[in-house]
């Protein structure tokens, strides 16, 4: 009697849950339901296009996807094509691994001006995500501002700082690569509302911007503290590494390379300046008190024609599931949401951590699913066959894993030069590959 599990979302959290279920050695059948034809969530649509090594983790997920117990139903949106209740009726367990796809709102005057983008949209655009492929940001600017001091902010700043040659080994879609190449941007500002010790950028990513061929990172030495203060061992080591890196950056020469990446600390955005289109940003000087940024009442302006707000993401409610409006997550007890309903990854705990942080979520969800099923000792629900019947009744065209491999093979075939793939950026273009004879 197999346990039939539907996993909604095929990003890291979904794949770690599937792998953990299989590792438990019980009789399970696992079906991924994914909104896009393409699998792997943020690995394809979030991890920066110039970080191809990081994207290789998808090879591990593929091993899971190809296991006999597992099926993939892409191009099926829960909440639009089928309801969550449809899945709960048909599966013993449903796992919501739907991530946190929306930008945290930049709530300052002028944030609605043309040329101001949230990172989810901007990153989605340069990664060829079908939702954002028409964003068309104007990169014809001399200066760009990135708000936030996390790994997403540094991804955006780094891509703006990359040389043509560096971009040529990425999987940026052609429209984005062309826009970055043509961009005359010379000054890229990264604004952190707290200090160098509080930034959330990991050290590997920070050091990487010191190696860009055409962009030099700059830090004002006067903003660097002597030490990182009293912290726990591991955190202290990590912060000290960042501080060392910032010290190194503070000795760099702004004339060294054609582009400059300015790290500006203690700078909280207060207003976007300009007419219909952004012409600059006003920031308030801050100081850090009890770990929080506190405004000093002193303001300064920086001219720029592009603003990308990378201040974090948030989850979205899904019809049929509870939602915690304050934390923007699906409320859960260690991954349990309701009888037969579970959550994993960012929608369970909020948008933090690196890819592997999702692995323990998957293990926990798998343990709960099997324990709950076994302790109820009930009959299995029908699972896969009932889902396929429903999809056919509703005339929903689903994409199998084999179909995805055909789409991917066409992406590989179409790639030119050193580019690893040429992404299809619309769902129609992906489906057209499958319709070609
Ligand atoms: P994040 O790590 O939470 O960083 C958000 C940044 O925005 C923080 O510096 C935060 O400052 C700042 N911020 C928040 N609200 C703000 C406001 N109103 N005004 C000004 N600044 C504000 O989020 P993220 O960069 O979106 O990354 C999400 C997760 O994905 C993170 O766990 C990240 O490590 C991970 N990720 C990892 C990689 C990688 O490993 N290479 C790449 C991309 C993303 P405060 O600290 O003061 O709140």
Image (spheres, grey):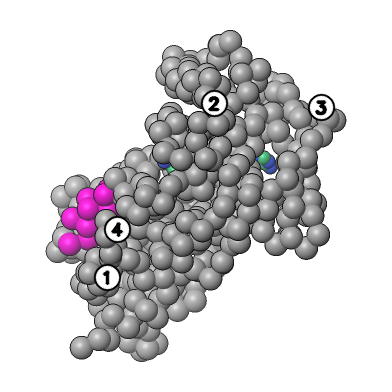
Q: CA distance from mark 4 to mark 2?
A: 32 Å
Over which residues does the magenta segment extend?
A: 56-66
Which sits in the foreground, 245 or 427?
245
Dot 3 alpha-carbon crowd within 10 angstroms: few under 14, some 14 to 19, many 20 or more: few
Report if residue 181 lies within the magenta region.
no
Residue 33 location, quadrant: bottom left
Quadrant location of the C terminus in the rendered image: bottom left
Residue 142 in percent (x, y) is at 63, 49
Q: Provide the secondary structure element on which disc 2 rests.
A: loop
Q: Nearer the viewer, mark 4 or mark 2?
A: 2
Identify which residue is drawn at 49% across, 20% down: 248
Q: Please identify the quadrant where the N terminus is shown.
A: bottom left
> Relative to 340, is 399 above or below?
below
Query: Is 52 located above or below residue 300 in the figure?
Result: below
Q: Is residue 63 magenta?
A: yes
Q: Read off the residue under disc 2.
A: 253
Any part of residue 368 in sight: no
Say which element carries label 1: helix
Q: What residue is shown with label 4?
A: 419
Q: Which mark is residue 296?
A: 3
Instruction: Answer with mark 3 or mark 2, whichever residue precedes in sequence.
Output: 2
Residue 332 lies left or right of residue 222; in this view the side is left
Q: CA distance from mark 3 to mark 2?
A: 30 Å
Q: Which mark is residue 68?
A: none
How far apart marks 3 and 1 lie (CA) works out to 54 Å
Q: Secondary structure at mark 4?
A: loop
Residue ID for mark 1: 414
Left or right for 240, reference 430: right
Q: Main secondary structure of the magenta part?
A: helix
């Amino acid at each position: 009697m197999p346990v039939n599990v539907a996993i909604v979302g095929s990003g890291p959290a979904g794949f770690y849950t599937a792998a953990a279920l299989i590792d438990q050695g019980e009789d399970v059948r696992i079906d991924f339901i994914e909104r896009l034809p393409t699998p792997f969530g943020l690995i394809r649509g979030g991890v920066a296009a110039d970080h191809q090594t990081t994207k290789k983790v998808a090879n591990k997920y593929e091993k899971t996807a190809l296991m006999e117990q597992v099926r993939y139903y892409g191009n099926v949106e829960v909440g639009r094509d089928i309801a969550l209740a449809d899945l709960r009726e048909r599966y013993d367990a449903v796992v919501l691994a739907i991530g946190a796809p929306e930008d945290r709102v930049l709530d300052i005057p002028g944030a609605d001006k043309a040329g101001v983008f949230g990172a989810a949209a901007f990153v989605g655009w340069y990664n060829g995500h079908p939702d954002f492929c028409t964003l068309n940001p104007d990169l014809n600017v001399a200066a760009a501002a990135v708000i936030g001091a996390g790994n997403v902010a540094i991804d955006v700043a780094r891509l703006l700082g990359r040389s043509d040659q560096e971009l040529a080994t990425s999987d940026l879609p052609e429209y984005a690569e062309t826009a970055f190449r043509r961009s005359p941007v010379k000054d890229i500002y990264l604004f952190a509302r707290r200090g160098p010790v509080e930034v959330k950028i990991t050290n590997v990513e920070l050091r990487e911007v010191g190696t860009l061929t055409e962009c030099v990172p700059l830090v004002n030495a006067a903003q660097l503290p002597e030490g990182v203060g009293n912290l726990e061992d591991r955190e202290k080591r990590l912060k000290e590494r960042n501080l060392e890196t910032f010290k190194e950056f503070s000795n760099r020469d702004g004339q060294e390379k054609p582009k400059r990446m300015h790290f500006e600390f203690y700078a909280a955005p207060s207003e976007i300046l300009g007419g219909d289109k952004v012409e600059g940003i006003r920031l308030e000087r801050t100081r850090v008190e009890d770990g929080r940024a506190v405004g000093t009442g002193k303001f300064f302006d920086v001219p720029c024609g592009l603003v990308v707000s990378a201040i974090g993401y948030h989850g979205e409610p899904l019809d049929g599931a509870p939602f915690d409006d304050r934390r923007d997550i699906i409320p859960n007890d260690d991954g349990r949401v309701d009888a037969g309903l579970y959550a994993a990854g960012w929608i369970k705990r909020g948008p933090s951590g690196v890819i592997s942080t999702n692995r323990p979520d998957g293990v926990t969800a798998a343990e709960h699913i099997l324990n709950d099923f076994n302790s109820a000792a009930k009959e299995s629900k029908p699972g896969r066959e009932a889902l396929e019947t429903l999809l056919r009744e509703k005339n929903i065209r689903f994409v199998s894993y084999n179909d995805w491999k055909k789409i991917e093979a066409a992406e590989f075939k179409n790639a030119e030069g050193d580019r690893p793939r040429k992404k299809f950026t619309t769902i129609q273009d992906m489906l057209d590959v499958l319709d070609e004879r």
